[in-house]
Image: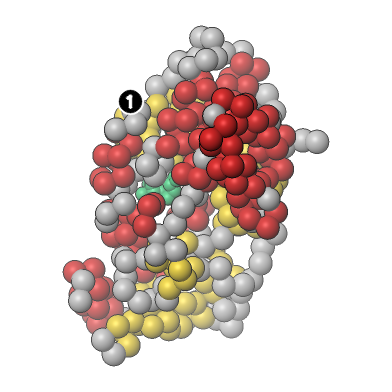
Amino acid sequence: MSDLAAVLRARIARDGPLRLDHWMAACNAAYYTGPDPLGRDFVTAPEISQMFGEIIGGWIGDLWLRAGRPAVRLVELGPGRGTLIADALRVLARVPGFAAPLALVETSPALRAQQAGRVVADWYDSLSDVPDDLPVIIIANEFFDALPIRQFDGAGGERAAAIAGDGFAAAVIPAPGTPAGEASPAGHVIAAVIGDRLRRQGGAALIIDYGYADTVAGDTLQALRNHSMADPFAAPGDSDLTAHVDFTALARAAGALRVSGPVPQGVWLARLGIEARAAALQSRNRDAAGGIAAALVRLTAPTQMGNLFKAMALSAPHWPKPAGFDT
Ligand code: SAH
């Protein structure tokens, strides 16, 4: 039995079944601290192609120019291997006059070390710790889906983890008066901090993730191990636990701001010129043309990541409208 499993068994034996969000928080903290989760169990958009981070770099540069070239701080939440921000900064280096301190919010020491190999930055455990002296441009790709959720059955119960034999299994504990569905209290807290920062400091936040815009009452919890679906209650800390992001709930938790989108990732990337970027890369490297075409399809096709993944921007009302959200 892993150390985490032993700790969780002792905790459940003492306090009773563990609420799903507490289970998910403990499992993911262990998971992201482990060896190279991004290569082993799942692949994210920036790891599929440099085009993804480059388009985001262009989006940042465009917004910054139209905002009147203010001093800003760049912030990324959950930067993984640091690939997205390294690709974005390569584009931003070509925007005359652009310079910004980079703050990375990352809890995993292993991933911090990988990020440090890619970019110069300051690291923080939480967005609340990032200095509030400048307008901020915040990027979060596949960050909110990793945050813990609660699941309510609509009949006064919620999902929890209980001890079952040598392992664990789902159980129901009382949650009187709660409507059926999922909620991410941790995500809402971070969205509220984003909203507060944007109103006080100015700036914008780009949130890209898999999820939905209108509340659904289904079970979206999923565990991935070695690129396959696993049981979220088996082997705690050994699989990646995620849930679909409720964009409407995030925007509501952020409070009064300009909300752009969500729009499907494929549509957003196309509006920002990913096809032209793919063609330019292909013309420079004929041998890689097939791989670039395949990556383009994977990122944008509705049957691949193009529809399930969505982009939403939150921005200060006095900032210009972020690109890619209007027809
Ligand atoms: N954005 C990256 C990685 C996505 S995986 C990419 O697109 O490839 C999720 C990331 O969020 C990891 O870097 C993980 O360590 C980090 N993370 C998860 N929970 C976190 C938390 N509560 N606070 C800060 N970072 C967290």
Residue 8 in the image, given as x and y percentages of width and height: 26, 73
Badge 1 crowding class, 10 Å Cα cut-off, few under 14, some 14 to 19, many 20 or more, is few
307 relative position to 112: left or right: right
Report helix, strand or loop for mark 1. loop
In what quadrant of the picture does the N terminus appear?
bottom left
In what quadrant of the picture does the C terminus appear?
top right
**Which one is nearer the viewer's eye here, 286 or 277?**
286
Image height of 62 relative to 23, above or below: above
**Which one is nearer the viewer's eye here, 103 or 290?**
290
For the residue marked with disc 1, what is the amino acid?
Val
Residue found at x 37% / y 42% = 81
Residue found at x 43% / y 30% = 86
- Res 314 quadrant in image: top right
What scheme was used to colour the molecule?
Answer: secondary structure
Image height of 96 relative to 152, above or below: above
Residue 94 in the image, given as x and y percentages of width and height: 52, 15
Residue found at x 47% / y 23% = 90
- Res 40 quadrant in image: bottom left
Residue 130 in the image, given as x and y percentages of width and height: 38, 32
Q: What is the residue that sits farthest to the right in this orientation?
A: 327
* Residue carrying label 1: 120
**Which one is nearer the viewer's eye here, 166 or 156?**
166
